[in-house]
Amino acid sequence: MAMDPVPVRLAPGAESGLAHIVQQFLEQDQAQFEGKRRRAARLRGRIAMTAADHGATVTLEFKGDEIAIHDGMPGPVDASITGPHEALVRLLQGRAHPLLEHLRGRLRVRSRPGRLLFPLRLHRLMKLSGGEHAGR
């Protein structure tokens, strides 16, 4: 039985271009791939993404039954990813790995203790994989 996509909504006041880009990528991926819908439903936590060169931050809040996107960083987060806008878009497109980009100095990835793997779980949601794309 196919599962419905996890709704992705912009929180009140989320109007930045980065918030809309994140929403678009998350909705498109889930619309196309059943595996990504399952991963999105299992994720729980908050991750901030900052495009340092644009001075824009969004926080993705994964709740299981929805994903909320906030402008800024309202409240504590489980992890954060900071870097140039272009590097964040590559990450959202699934064309970059957060830890490899961190080691290369292109992104700064931080996690709070107990949530060290959260950026990797987000990457699993966003990454391109041959098996999922075979059905396109």
Image (spheres, rainbow, N blue to C red):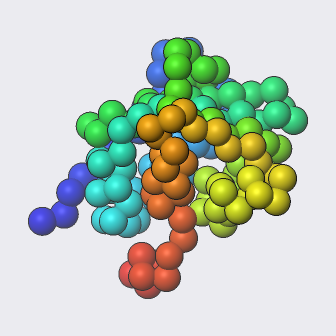
Rendered image quadrant of residue 97: bottom right
Residues 11 and 111: in front is 111
Residue 19: name its quadrant: top right
Q: Position of residue 40 (x, y in %)?
A: 36, 50
- Residue 43's place in the image compared with 11, above or below, is below
- Residue 12, given in percent of the width and then of the height, sits at 49, 15
The C terminus - image quarter: bottom left
Asked whether the viewer can see residue 60, the reply is no
Residue 46 is left or right of residue 79, and the answer is: left
Q: Residue at x 33, y 65 (%)?
A: 35
| Residue 13 locus on image (x, y percent) | 56, 15
Which residue, as the protein is rendered here, is positioned at the far front?
Answer: 113
State the residue at coordinates (58%, 42%).
Answer: 22
Furthest-left residue in this view: 1
Residue 100 vertical placement versus 45 (above, below): below
Q: How many marks?
A: 0
Q: Residue at x 75, y 43 (%)?
A: 108
Looking at the figure, which quarter contains the N terminus?
Answer: bottom left
Q: Residue furthest right?
A: 53
Q: Quadrant of residue 51?
A: top right
Q: Is residue 57 left or right of residue 75?
A: right
Residue at 47% across, 21% down: 11
Residue 100 shows in this picture: yes
Across and down, in percent, residue 74 comes to 55, 15
Residue 21 vs residue 94, the one in the foreground: 94
Identify whether 115 is placed above or below 98: above
